């Protein structure tokens, strides 16, 4: 059994956060199912409007409408849900998506892929706030800024280690040569960084560890190493409730260890993804000029970019196994069957074996 964790004025019954997965992989379907089991469901704010009719013409309005619709579904259908929205700092309309999420009822904003230095200004104490960091240094920079400029401290923190899926907060040579700090080390250092801010603001700041957590034993281990809970993403992809196309789930089920590797992202970070035909076709290729840019990420320049990440992720979530970009954590190869969220959550809590 895992104990509930208090996050400021709210209690997370099961100390498991389902990591936000863009584009379209974690929307209301998955988030709702995780909330029902007492975990924190997280909707990804990365281009959720991709199915809206006006997406090509006005992606920002389409995204706001879809994002708010997804949030409201969870809040209306799951009483007492603890719902987060993952908004990437690198998003071009970051402030807009944060405010739209809060307006629709998000309980927490989780924010990485950059340093969320001004998140408190946009949230205005209307939701809980969690930076996602991959080093103690990033945590320190954020805490000092929030302290100095916004007179506050994070409500909880996600520490994402080198085994995570999607964009990674480490340099590619360090990842390739296994020179990154371990998740356990980063958790310990982040907790130390948080100490003075917990004291100053008289609040406890729970830390959730992410990246490569797979089993109940992994959770117990990382909690013994100091984490208050975990954030997990890959483990939830091959569930019936996950919002991705069935072919995406099959990609995860069939992935072997050697199929999982790195990809250069237009966002300027390395990413971890399945090495399918698309990823291989981009390796060692010069940058391209991309037509019909949707303006998703600040660091990407449409005139000179490895590929359009929005189009590649949309192809993936819609099941195009050849041409899509399939983000995954290192542990996808351990998943061999489609399951449901209830049995995954039970097994993660050590409450019996997973049923398929
Ligand atoms: C398909 C996929 C998409 C992801 N998209 C995002 C995202 O949009 N924003 C973000 O902060 N993290 C994203 N992540 C990272 C996860 O939220 C999570 O922290 C990480 O994958 C945890 O490691 P695990 O997958 O080994 O459990 C993504 C991960 C995956 C697998």
Image: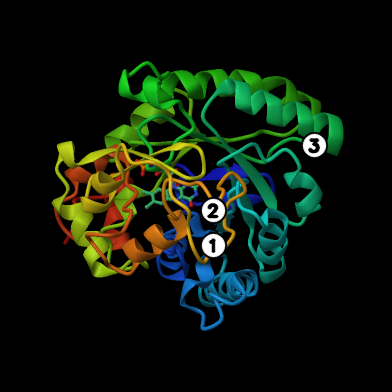
The colouring scheme, among rainbow, by chain, secondary structure or one colour, is rainbow
Is residue 130 found left or right of 263 in the rendered image?
Answer: right
Tell me whether circle 2 and circle 1 mark residues in contact (CB < 8 Å): yes
165 and 212: which one is in front? 165
Q: How far apart are marks 2 and 1 (CA)?
A: 6 Å
* Quadrant assignment for the N terminus: top left
112 and 51: which one is in front? 51
Is residue 102 found left or right of 245 in the rendered image?
Answer: right
- Mark 3 close to ligand 1, CB under 8 Å: no
Asked whether the viewer can see residue 25, the reply is no
Residue assigned mark 3:
152
Residue assigned mark 2:
302
Is residue 72 found left or right of 261 in the rendered image?
Answer: right
Q: Position of residue 352 (x, y in %)?
A: 22, 50
* Quadrant assignment for the C terminus: bottom left
Task: Work out whether mark 3 precedes mark 2 in sequence or the reverse, and give the earlier one.
Answer: 3
Asked whether the viewer can see residue 35, the reply is yes
Residue 85, by quadrant, is: bottom right
Q: Distance between the residues labelled 3 and 1?
A: 37 Å
């Amino acid at each position: 059994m895992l104990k509930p964790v208090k996050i400021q004025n709210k209690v997370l019954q099961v100390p498991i956060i389902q990591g936000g997965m863009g584009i379209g992989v974690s929307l209301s379907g998955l988030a709702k199912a995780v909330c029902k089991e007492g975990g924190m469901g997280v909707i990804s704010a990365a281009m959720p409007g991709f199915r809206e009719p006006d997406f090509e013409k006005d992606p920002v309005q389409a995204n706001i409408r879809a994002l708010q619709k997804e949030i409201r579904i969870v809040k209306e259908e799951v009483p007492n849900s603890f719902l987060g929205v993952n908004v990437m700092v690198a998003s071009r309309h970051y402030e807009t998506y944060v405010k739209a999420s809060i307006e629709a009822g998000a309980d927490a904003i989780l924010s990485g892929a950059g340093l969320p230095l001004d998140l408190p200004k946009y949230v205005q104490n209307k939701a809980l706030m969690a930076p996602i960091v991959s080093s103690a240094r990033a945590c320190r920079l954020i805490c000092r800024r929030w302290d100095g400029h916004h007179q506050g401290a994070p409500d909880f923190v996600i520490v994402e280690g080198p085994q995570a899926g999607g964009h990674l907060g480490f340099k590619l040579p360090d990842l390739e040569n296994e020179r990154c700090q371990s998740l356990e080390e980063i958790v310990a250092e982040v907790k130390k960084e948080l100490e003075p801010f917990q004291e100053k603001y008289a609040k406890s700041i729970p830390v959730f560890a992410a990246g490569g957590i797979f089993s109940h034993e992994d959770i117990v281990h990382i909690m013994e190493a100091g984490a208050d809970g975990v954030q997990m993403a890959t483990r939830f992809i091959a569930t019936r409730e996950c919002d991705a196309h069935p072919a995406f789930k099959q990609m995860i089920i069939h992935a072997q260890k050697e199929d999982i590797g790195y990809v250069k992202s237009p966002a300027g970070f390395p990413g971890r993804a399945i090495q399918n035909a698309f990823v291989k076709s981009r390796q060692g290729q010069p940058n391209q000029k991309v037509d019909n840019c949707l303006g998703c990420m600040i660091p990407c320049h449409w005139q000179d970019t490895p590929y359009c990440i929005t189009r590649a992720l949309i192809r993936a979530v819609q099941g195009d196994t050849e041409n899509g970009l399939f983000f995954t954590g290192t542990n996808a190869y351990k998943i061999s069957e489609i399951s449901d969220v209830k049995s995954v959550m039970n097994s993660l809590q050590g409450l019996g074996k997973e049923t398929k």
